[in-house]
């Protein structure tokens, strides 16, 4: 076993109880404990070269069977440049560093080799042609190798940055999982104090949610009626009426599906309007917000977006439907949506599809789990 930078002995890489993380590299430090590269707060995250050596990440983090993350040393963190020779005036790396200049020199040699090959070809000097061609190819390889020194070292350092973040996220996830255990204990305590089971608590919460949903539905339907009453009174909202409707019901819609882009929905509705069937889809989305499948609300809203803009929202609607209708293949869903568009798109209204033509898909979304439960 090798002592880790924190002074603890870490398991060897080949031990059976060790599970490797995503190459989680730590940063090299000198004898005084000063980091030389790859820290998240560095100004430029570049590899640091001191004298004839450069500092690279020197250890890796591993996770044992219990989920605990420890560190093991994989190298000294120092790489000797050019056999330990003193650095040139411009340093090894950088725009005017030695390796960069060498790569430019080899690039020039490759060009010169190409010219020699052309001259040999013109004078029918076969040996000279192949020698010049070999020189050009070798010079290109050497130029690439020289130029890649700095890039490869910086890639390792950037990878160390990213994987250090992954390790932090892993620790955060472990803490959250531990907190979930505390939630389970609290639920058990509530069950004992109140003398009810978890199923009864869930039933009570479902009843409260239904009551809240009824109030929200009333708010949204009132917003639709009020906006239509103040406008043309044709059971269809357009332009200013849509502004009034979203001003009144935006909070309710956001609560039903917080991650959905209602601003884009409003923008498309300004062009096409919102009718009764579109309102039915919005109501379904609000009802589905309390369902065990959280994707139903998004699927209903995605249907509206597809109706308003079939070409621009085919893929997003397809992805939302696939999350709900898991037993249906993507090809079948795509064919169904394409058929709806081909049969019912209104060319004189920007290609939109009336929402009533997708009522069967909406009904399938809302009753999907019930159908599965009734299946033999």
Image (cartoon, grey):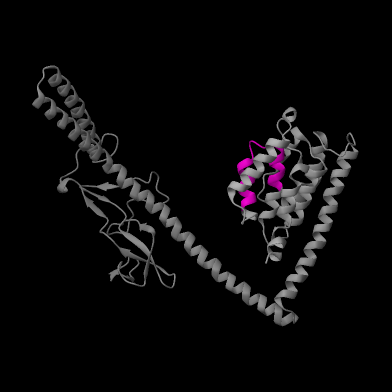
Q: Quadrant of residue 289?
A: bottom right
Question: Where residue 212 sits in the image (x, y, percent)?
Answer: 80, 60
Range shown magenta: 301-322
Q: Is residue 340 above or below residue 174?
A: above
Who's the residue at 70% across and 32% down the image?
351
Question: Where residue 308 sits in the image (x, y, percent)?
Answer: 71, 37
Q: Viewer-proximal residue, 85 or 362?
A: 362
Who's the residue at 20% across and 29% down the image?
110
Who's the residue at 71% across and 65% down the image?
374
Q: Is residue 263 visible?
A: no
Is 317 inside the magenta-drawn segment?
A: yes
Question: Where residue 66 sits in the image (x, y, percent)?
Answer: 43, 73
Q: Is residue 249 left or right of residue 87?
A: right
Q: Viewer-proximal residue, 331 or 111?
A: 331
Q: Is residue 313 visible?
A: yes
Q: Is residue 86 above or below residue 180?
A: above
Task: List the single residue furthest toward the front.
Answer: 376
Q: Quadrant of residue 128?
A: top left
């Amino acid at each position: 076993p090798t002592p880790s930078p924190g002074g603890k002995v870490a398991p060897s890489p080949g031990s059976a109880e060790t599970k490797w993380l995503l190459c989680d590299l730590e940063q090299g430090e000198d004898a005084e404990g000063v980091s030389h590269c790859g820290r998240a707060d560095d100004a430029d995250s570049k590899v640091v070269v001191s004298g004839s050596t450069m500092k690279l990440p020197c250890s890796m983090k591993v996770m044992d069977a219990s989920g605990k993350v420890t560190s093991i040393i994989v190298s000294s963190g120092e790489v000797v440049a050019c056999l330990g020779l003193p650095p040139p005036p411009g340093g090894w790396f950088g725009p005017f560093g030695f390796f960069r200049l060498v790569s430019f020199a080899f690039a020039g040699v490759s060009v010169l080799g190409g010219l020699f090959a052309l001259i040999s070809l013109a004078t029918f000097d076969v040996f000279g042609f192949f020698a010049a061609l070999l020189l050009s190819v070798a010079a290109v390889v050497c130029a690439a190798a020289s130029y890649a020194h700095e890039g490869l070292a910086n890639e390792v350092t950037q990878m160390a940055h990213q994987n250090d973040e992954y390790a932090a996220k892993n620790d955060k996830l472990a803490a959250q999982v531990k907190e979930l255990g505390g939630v389970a204990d609290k639920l058990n305590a509530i069950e004992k104090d109140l003398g009810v089971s978890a199923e009864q608590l869930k039933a009570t919460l479902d009843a409260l949610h239904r009551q809240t949903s009824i109030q929200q539905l009333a708010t949204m339907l009132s917003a639709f009626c009020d906006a239509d009453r103040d406008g043309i009174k044709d059971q269809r909202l357009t332009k200013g009426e849509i502004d009034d409707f979203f001003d009144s019901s935006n909070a309710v819609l956001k609560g039903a599906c917080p991650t959905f882009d209602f601003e884009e929905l409003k923008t498309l509705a300004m062009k096409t309007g919102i009718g009764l069937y579109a309102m039915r889809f919005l109501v379904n989305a609000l009802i589905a917000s309390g369902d065990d499948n959280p994707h139903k609300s998004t699927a209903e809203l995605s249907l509206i977006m597809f109706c308003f803009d079939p070409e621009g929202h085919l893929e997003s609607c397809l992805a939302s439907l696939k999350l709900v209708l898991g037993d249906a293949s993507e090809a079948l869903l795509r064919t169904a949506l394409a058929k709806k568009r081909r049969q019912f798109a209104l060319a004189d209204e920007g290609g939109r599809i009336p929402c009533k033509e997708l009522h069967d898909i909406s009904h399938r979304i809302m009753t999907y789990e019930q159908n599965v439960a009734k299946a033999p």
